[in-house]
Amino acid sequence: MKLSVLGCSGGIGSGRHTTCLKVDDDVLIDAGTGITTLDFDQLLAIDHIFLTHAHLDHVLGLPLLLDSMGDMRESPLTVHALPEVLEVLSTHLFNWRLWPDFRMIPSAEAPWLRFSPLAFGDAFELGGRTFRALPVNHGVPACAFHLATAAGSLVFSGDTTRSEAFVAALNAIADLRHLIVDTSFENALAGVARASGHHWPDSLAEELRALRVRPEVWITHLKPGNEAAIMNDLHAVAPAWALKALQQGQLIEI
Ligand SMILES: [Zn+2]
Ligand SMILES: [Zn+2]
């Protein structure tokens, strides 16, 4: 499995893109502005999108993707997410007011888009890769994704702050090789991080101390302009982990 980082910033500006990870050629995890780095053929090859939650920085590429590619697709694009997340998209995005409902276009029988609820505990198998939703804590319905292959596992937290349930889920993945985890703000902005449901260095360090698995840990969703401060704080509070910022354009292979 090849995971390509198309976008991993907590915002935009100076080449930064918001969250979008590509798994091999056919799957995206989240559809932030990173999706705009794909060319036409690459966009057309995407058949499945797994959404961690419905915040705009993670979904805004989805309606534009369908508008650009829908008529060229031979089968519907499938969006996998928690039922609560799909409900938000139905009510507030694909509602004929903010955007057309592509689950009815060109017809309800043969649409360009379909929703596939993925509840906690479900596992979705796709060509030797398994996708599972894990619990996180972000103040709105949200999940992490556990990608499992025969060669090992990767977990992407999506957006989260402290979550004992997430740590417990990680500790149950014996073959966890990579953990991509949110740390959006430096310690001086811990109040903002707490209020917005994101980690800050001290909170992440506390969770790392509770880990019984030893994955390579990549930091994501750093706020633009705050990257150096966040990483400096992380290196001070969790020196043993050699934490690295996830980079746009990076490839992680399992
Ligand atoms: Zn969010
Ligand atoms: Zn976000």
Image: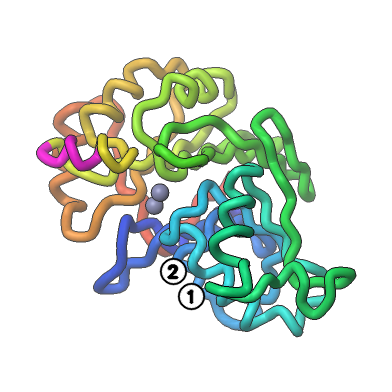
Neighbour class for label 1 at 10 Å: few (<14), some, many (≥20)? some
Give me the C-alpha separation between circle 2 and circle 1: 6 Å
**How many marks do you count on the picture?**
2
Q: Looking at the image, is 64 positioned above or below residue 139?
A: below
Q: In this view, does 72 lie to the left or right of 164?
A: right
Image quarter (top left, top right, bottom left or bottom right) of the C terminus: top right
Q: Which residue lies furthest to the left in this view?
A: 188
* Region of the chain picked out in magenta, as a range: 188-193
Q: Is residue 231 shown to the viewer in this render? A: no
Neighbour class for label 2 at 10 Å: few (<14), some, many (≥20)? many
Query: In the image, what residue occupies the spot 59% across and 54% down?
Result: 2
User: Which percent across, then down, holds residue 24?
Assistant: 64, 58
Say which amino acid is labelled 1: Thr
Q: Name the residue under label 1.
A: 36
Q: Looking at the image, is 113 positioned above or below residue 252?
A: below
Q: Looking at the image, is 222 positioned above or below residue 153?
A: below
Pick whichever, 11 or 212, lies toward us.
11
Is 68 magenta? The answer is: no
Tag on residue 33?
2
**CB of mark 2 within 8 Å of CB of mark 1?**
yes
Q: What colour scheme was applied to this rendering of the protein?
A: rainbow
Q: In this view, does 150 lie to the left or right of 254?
A: right
